[in-house]
Image (cartoon, grey):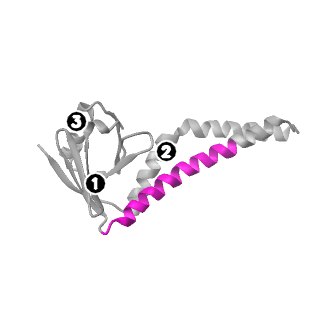
Amino acid sequence: MPHETTLIYSPTLLRQAVFAFWWRSVGIGFFVALLIAALGLVVLVALGQSSWIIGGLATVLAVGVAFAIVVYVVHYRRSLQKFRQMNSPQATFRAEESSFTMVSDIGTTTLQWSAVKELWKFSNVWLLLYSKAQFTTLPRACLSPETQAYIVQCVRAAGGKVDG
């Protein structure tokens, strides 16, 4: 039985979605590693060391911070660009047994559920991930409990992972 709903987007919702994606993608381990590198750098400088290790640690730290920032900014700008292209900040989401369709004033797309590698569930948004860097945002407030259960069922039936 098909499930259809209207998804309503806002810049705040997109920011939450991108932050949730970014945090889960980059992960706490990444920031722990950066903190350890920073502490190592501080200790070496405090001890008066002046070797290539300091330069290496400083480079790792700078590249790590830049990487984290770039991942967030690229995804946020891409999401905001799509949002601004829309005359009306909404889309129709229709879920069927083997596929789902999203329709907005900028286009229509239909994908098989097998295209969804993972479903990440957060309190305000659900993210349908197609790869490690590509996802669709579903505002959770727009999804009835029945539609949510149906999406989970379809993702799992197609071999996707449900996380959250």
Residue 154 x/y as whole percent: 22, 37
Instruction: Give the class, few, some or many, for how many residues have Cα within 10 Å of label 2's Cα (few <14, many ≥20).
Output: some
Callouts 1 and 3 close, C-beta under 8 Å: no
Residue holding disc 3: 153
Residue 14 x/y as whole percent: 40, 57
> From what the image shows, is residue 66 above or below residue 55?
below
Q: Residue at x 53, y 48 (%)?
A: 71
> From what the image shows, is residue 18 above or below residue 9?
above
Instruction: Give the class, few, some or many, for how many residues have Cα within 10 Å of label 1's Cα (few <14, many ≥20).
Output: few
Query: How far is disc 1 from disc 2 in space, using C-alphas?
Result: 21 Å
Q: Nearer the viewer, mark 1 or mark 2?
A: 2
Instruction: Say which quarter of the image contains residue 104.
Output: bottom left
Q: Quadrant of the N terminus?
A: top left
Name the main secondary structure of what is drawn in magenta: helix
Query: How far is disc 2 from disc 3 in space, using C-alphas?
Result: 25 Å
Q: Which residues are magenta?
A: 61-87
Query: How far is disc 1 from disc 3 in space, using C-alphas?
Result: 19 Å
Could you tell whether 153 is left or right of 85 in the image?
A: left
Q: Is 76 one of the magenta-colored residues?
A: yes
Q: Secondary structure at mark 2?
A: helix
Residue holding disc 2: 23
- Among the two numbered marks 2 and 3 on one chain, the one whose residue lies closer to the N terminus: 2
Residue 48 x/y as whole percent: 88, 39
Amino acid found under the numbered disc labelled 1: Ala
Q: Residue at x 79, y 40 (%)?
A: 55
- Label annotation for residue 4: none
Q: Is 19 one of the magenta-colored residues?
A: no
